[in-house]
Amino acid sequence: MNNKNEWFKLNKRNRTFLYWYLGFLLLFSLIAVALIIFLKNDFINKLNIEKTAILGCIVFPLFGSSLFYIRKLYKACINLDLIEPVTNEDRIRQDGIIFYFVLRPIFSIGFGLLLFLSFKIGVSAMAKSAELNDGFIYSCMFFSFFIGYSSGDVIDKFEKVGKKIVAGSFETKNEN
């Protein structure tokens, strides 16, 4: 066992649950990704470019996050970084680990939607006519995949940036 991961405590039942959960999300998102790519023009005709991009910003980060966290789980098993919970503290820690793995893909969807909003704001700020083409969809899908895959890093970055924004918003400037 790797000492740095001695906090990683999951029993067999919960490992199995997480494999099924993450496996389902991975398979679902992979199918949805393929459909969006292959049927992009049909989606654009039925929805429009903006709504198709939103759909991409939901599915692609889910795909990236599911891929990352299922990989993290199986690597922990291969490296024997998982420990069976023994004490009540271990079981509490196990609950946190389950929520960690269950919620990260959901967080990634929210981050994908924030990415869509930031791209939309950027396009609106740069162009008088905010006419979008399918390049907007591809950009949203590409970058939202990495937002999902790196959702843990995104959370860390939001925490740092968010603290600066909040602190700066409430600072008063001394006028002489």
Image (cartoon, rainbow, N blue to C red):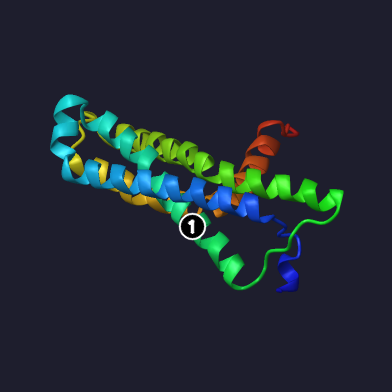
Quarter of the image with the N terminus in it: bottom right
Q: Position of residue 81 (x, y in %)?
A: 67, 68
Residue 145 to residue 120: above or below: below
Q: Kindly indicate the quadrant of the structure image that contains residue 102.
A: top right
Q: Residue at x 85, y 50 (%)?
A: 89
Q: Position of residue 146 (x, y in %)?
A: 42, 54
Q: Which amino acid lies under the numbered mark 1 shown in the image of this protein? A: Phe
Q: Residues within 10 Å of mark 1 (few under 14, many from 20)?
A: some
Q: Tell me if 36 is positioned left or right of 92 in this view.
A: left
Q: Residue at x 61, y 54 (%)?
A: 15
Q: Circle 1 — which element? A: helix
Q: Nearer the viewer, residue 129 or 11?
A: 11
Q: Residue at x 48, y 36 (%)?
A: 110
Q: Nearer the viewer, residue 130 or 176?
A: 130
Q: Kindly indicate the quadrant of the structure image that contains residue 176.
A: top right
Residue carrying label 1: 68
Q: Nearer the viewer, residue 67 or 172?
A: 67
Q: Nearer the viewer, residue 125 or 6?
A: 6
Residue 45 to residue 38: above or below: above
Q: Tell me if 104 is positioned left or right of 53 in this view.
A: right
